[in-house]
Amino acid sequence: MLKDSDMIVNKLKKETNNNGDIIYRVKYINKQKLYVIYNEPLCSSEMISNFIIRSLDFIDNKYKRKVDIVSVIKNDINNFKVKEITTYEDLCFYLHNAFTIILVDGYDTALAMENKGALSRGIDKPTTESTLRGPMDAFVENIQINLGLIRRRLKDNKLWSKEYFLGRYTKTKTNVLYIDGIAKKEIVDKVDKLIKKIDIDGVINLGTIKNFIQKENKSAFPTIITTERPDHVCQALLKGKIAILMDNCPFVLILPTFFNDFFLSLEDDSNQSINISFTRIIRYIAFFITVLTPGIYIAITTYNQEMLPTELLISFAGQRSSVPFPAFFEALLMTLSFEILRESDLRIPSTSSSALSIVGALILGEAAVNAGIVSPIMIIVVSITMISSLLFIEPDFINGIRWWRLFFMLGGSFMGIIGIVLVFITFMIKIASIKSFGKPYLMPFVPTSIDGLKNSVIKFPLKYLNRREKYLSSNTYRMGDDE
């Protein structure tokens, strides 16, 4: 109950250790006492002074007779967003979410008015996902702005949003977006159930939500993709996927995600289908190069030398004659060195990262060859491997590639080409067994979906992409098609 305003204020002061950031101001309307309470770092003091305080003074001068003060303030206050609250818990929640609280003595109902300060940065271009011909706006840390960037593109009543507040202490606002009538209800309900089960002290970033709802995935490859581009989210929603937004985070989760999604690009629709098909084939080739190349090299040089032409075998033997280590250790050492360079490139300031990585790679490779630690051919093999991995930007997908590259290297080291084949069979079985929110991870390949195959490795012209994938949506017809 909120009737005793003095008791509520004293309780709040005690629980916050009389925090100086929380401002308490006493006002009177018709000699009726009320408190104006707000969290100064979160709120705009200018807005509070110019709108709320002035409005209260105007109401005091206007109404000289006894009135329902709460109703009068609610109707006459110059604030666009006003909420009625009836519990102390709600009062604390809105107070810490940049709302100004008006607590009137003797009334069960208090008012919360939004007065958020400018704590978020402006909209900028994407930094982790490059765009050639697409929009140059990216998500920011303000969830309302992010929702606006999506709704500016999808202007339909069927774009539905479910709101959650996660974390016992953080109470982080989280929204699940989907298009009703396109997204499958079973997937929406599954995500809703998983999010409601999240019960921890705090949710600071999207990674926490991602780890909690990605329970089905027992593989290194992710079933959820992260993006900072609004056009990517809108394209996914139109396919029947679901987006998860979180306040204070400039990224959005898209699910369910399948293996083929990591080989697609948003710019694909801006180019001719024949050129995009060629590009996608290159991406798949690059994936197998970055996963298989070190392992195949180890297998051939260690066990299966008969697979090489005699001249090439003699050349390899001559280059490795001064190297004291086995091929596996040589490959592992160079791969680890390049991965360290890649990680350092991500962590240090962007102004110097590229230059340092290039110089580091050149010096490291040259010094290693001159010292006889590795052979020149190993530098070539590892360089091709690492360059091929640069086509992929999702961190979890890159980590999955790293793990399986290591497994192929171990297979080639112990059993040669037979080991590579066995690891490859294990890889296919493992990846085929992954479920992405109840759907097979290798869709549209296994099980085969004709509509999905039209936009997989080979991209058909847009006029033939007239249906949504059945595994994502029951509404397979796109707008404009004749059912």
Image: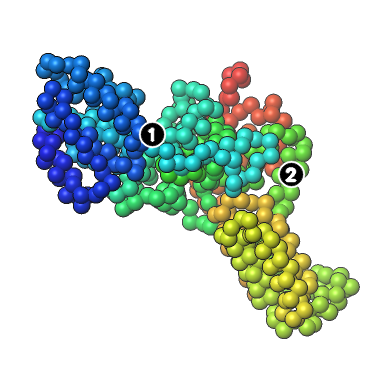
Residue under circle 2?
A: 279
Give how far across and how far down residue 28 sits, in percent: 16, 28
- Say if 269 sits above or below 207 in the image: above
Location of the C terminus by quadrant is top right
Residue at 53% of width from left, 38% of height from top? Answer: 123
The colour scheme is rainbow
Quick one: label 1, few (<14), some, or many (20+) residues within 10 Å? few
Chain-order first, disc 2 or disc 1: 1
Q: Secondary structure at mark 2?
A: helix
Image coordinates for residue 157, horizontal then vertical, percent: 45, 22
Residue at 69% of width from left, 43% of height from top? 457
Q: Which residue is mark 1?
A: 162
* Residue at screen point 70% across, 49% down: 283
Query: Which part of the image, by quadrant, shows the N terminus?
Result: top left
CA neighbours of label 2 inside 10 A, class few (<14), some (14 to 19), many (20+): some
Q: Quadrant of residue 329?
A: bottom right
What number of labels is visible?
A: 2
Along the line of sight, the residue nearer the viewer: 287 or 55: 55
Kind of element beneath mark 1: strand
Disc marking residue 192:
none
Q: Is residue 331 above or below residue 100?
A: below
Instruction: Give x and y (percent) for residue 475.
Output: 52, 27
The span from disc 2 to disc 1 (Cα, nearest Å) is 38 Å
Is 152 situated left or right of 41 in this image?
right
Foreground residue among 98 and 289: 98
In this rendering, does residue 51 appear at all? yes
Question: Is any part of residue 193 visible from this angle?
Answer: no
